[in-house]
């Protein structure tokens, strides 16, 4: 007589369930949803919010995920990552019993995940998501950040050492850490994880038209303007507006504390008498979706972008996109074209982008020409974007990586295939 298989109890360690903070939060949301919607596991996710936003709570309820809020224990201060990393026994006394799998996020909640496993669930499996290549991204932040890149990656290796599995988001990150894991510190298994487009964006209906041609960029500005390519966009839009007189540039993802600094950085890059950037604060998925519905083009001109979730969501919404070739998303698109899962016409959404600042003029010329071309032929570009969306969904590129993730979590293969 066979024993019944134990139902997995999965605990994801993060500071929020929503996606307002971008990449890590969005991947945590994808991972939580992937396991929660199977109905084959009890899924919990920590948050560092005393009052969870209504939108986040509704999403968690829909996805079959129980959110665990901190206990302030009389503290008046805002909950911080220390509450998870060093004081989880005080501020999170109500974690579930018999956890079988703990999931953290490299360089954000990996220390908290390992501490919680070691101190409270020694029998549980530990898994990590890796979202970033510090040796690439820190270079463009300059100063101490660039010098500390190797130290940060070594810290990430410390936390993932001997974990049951590590999941790298996209092939660009996977290739980087597959090499790193040749060293002494490594997880037991290493997988690629490819995010599936969010249903919210897939359900979006868009159309060309309107009295303006809106170009949308998403991502914070101060200290990362070179990394995210905002300087390239500004200088490119200076040339674009000379041809497309009704062009408008919107930038979503500005911190209120950095508003004036961000505006100055963008205005200095733009340096145009004909165009001012429109700055928008950090936004929810719903707010970004609304931005995209009003946009004619979404840009991702990053000099280094480990994946590029915003670009993926724009494609899912059916909006024309231009994506730097230095992104993980561009690598995925190129691979899908090579595999015959996407038409070769979509290679034109990828723009060659030099990482060398001495090539700035060439970068600006290429990006400006591409932007002008897309905006001039907006009706055709929206038709192409609709085909791109359909082919991307039909490719089901995410299926294998999601099956690998579910099985690593202890969810049977039959459930993973559903």
Image (tube, rainbow, N blue to C red):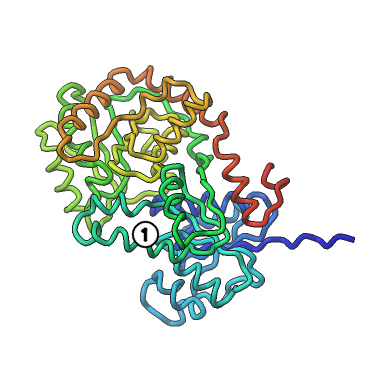
Image-based side of 352 in relation to 244, left or right: right
Residue named by callout 1:
153
Of residues 4 and 390, the one nearer the viewer is: 4
State the residue lying farthest toward the right.
1
In the image, residue 223 above or below residue 248: below
State the residue lying farthest toward the front.
183
Q: Residue 9, image x and y in percent?
A: 65, 63
The residue shown at (46%, 62%) is 184
Q: Residue 287, image x and y in percent?
A: 39, 44
- Residue 163 appears in which quarter of the rendering? bottom right
Of residues 14 and 187, the one nearer the viewer is: 187
In the image, residue 264 above or below residue 122: above
Quadrant into which the C terminus falls: top right
Q: Residue 20, image x and y in percent?
A: 40, 53
The residue shown at (35%, 29%) is 350
Of residues 231 and 353, the one nearer the viewer is: 353
The residue shown at (14%, 48%) is 264
The residue tagged with tag 1: helix, strand or loop?
helix
> Looking at the image, can residue 390 be seen?
no
């Amino acid at each position: 007589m066979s024993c019944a298989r134990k139902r997995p109890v999965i605990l994801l360690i993060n500071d929020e369930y929503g996606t307002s903070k971008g990449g890590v939060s969005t991947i945590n949301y994808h991972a939580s949803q992937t396991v929660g919607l199977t109905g084959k596991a009890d899924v919990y996710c920590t948050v560092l919010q005393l009052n969870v936003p209504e939108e986040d709570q509704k999403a968690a309820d829909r996805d079959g995920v129980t959110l665990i809020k901190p206990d302030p224990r009389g503290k008046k201060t805002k909950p911080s990552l220390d509450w998870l990393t060093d004081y989880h026994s005080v501020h999170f006394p109500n974690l579930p019993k018999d956890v079988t799998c703990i999931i953290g996020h490299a360089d954000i909640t990996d220390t908290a995940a390992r501490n919680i496993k070691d101190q409270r669930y020694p029998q549980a499996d530990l898994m990590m998501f890796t979202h970033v290549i510090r040796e690439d991204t820190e270079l463009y932040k300059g100063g101490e950040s660039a010098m500390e890149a190797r130290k940060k990656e070594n810290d990430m290796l410390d936390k993932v050492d001997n974990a049951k599995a590590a999941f790298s988001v996209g092939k660009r990150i996977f290739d980087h850490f597959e090499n790193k894991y040749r060293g002494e510190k490594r997880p037991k298994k290493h997988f690629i994880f490819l995010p599936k487009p969010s249903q919210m964006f897939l359900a979006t209906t868009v159309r060309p038209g309107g009295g303006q041609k809106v170009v949308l960029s998403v991502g914070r500005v101060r200290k990362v303007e070179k990394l995210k390519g905002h300087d390239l966009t500004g200088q490119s839009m200076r040339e674009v507006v000379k041809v497309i007189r009704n062009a408008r540039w919107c930038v979503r993802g500005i911190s209120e504390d950095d508003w004036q600094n961000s505006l100055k950085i963008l205005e200095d890059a733009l340096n145009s008498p004909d165009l001012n950037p429109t700055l928008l604060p950090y936004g929810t998925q719903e707010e970004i979706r609304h931005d995209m519905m009003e946009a004619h083009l979404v840009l991702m001109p990053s000099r280094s972008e480990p994946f590029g979730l915003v670009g993926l969501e724009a494609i899912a919404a059916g909006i024309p996109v231009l994506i730097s070739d230095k992104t993980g998303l561009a690598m995925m698109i190129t691979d899908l074209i090579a595999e015959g899962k996407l038409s070769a016409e979509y290679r034109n959404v990828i723009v060659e982008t030099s990482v060398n600042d001495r090539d700035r003029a060439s970068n600006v010329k290429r990006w400006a020409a591409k932007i002008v071309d897309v905006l001039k032929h907006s009706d055709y570009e929206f038709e192409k974007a609709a085909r791109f969306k359909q082919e991307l969904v039909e490719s089901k590129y995410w299926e294998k990586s999601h099956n690998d993730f579910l099985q690593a979590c202890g969810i049977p293969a039959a459930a993973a295939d559903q």
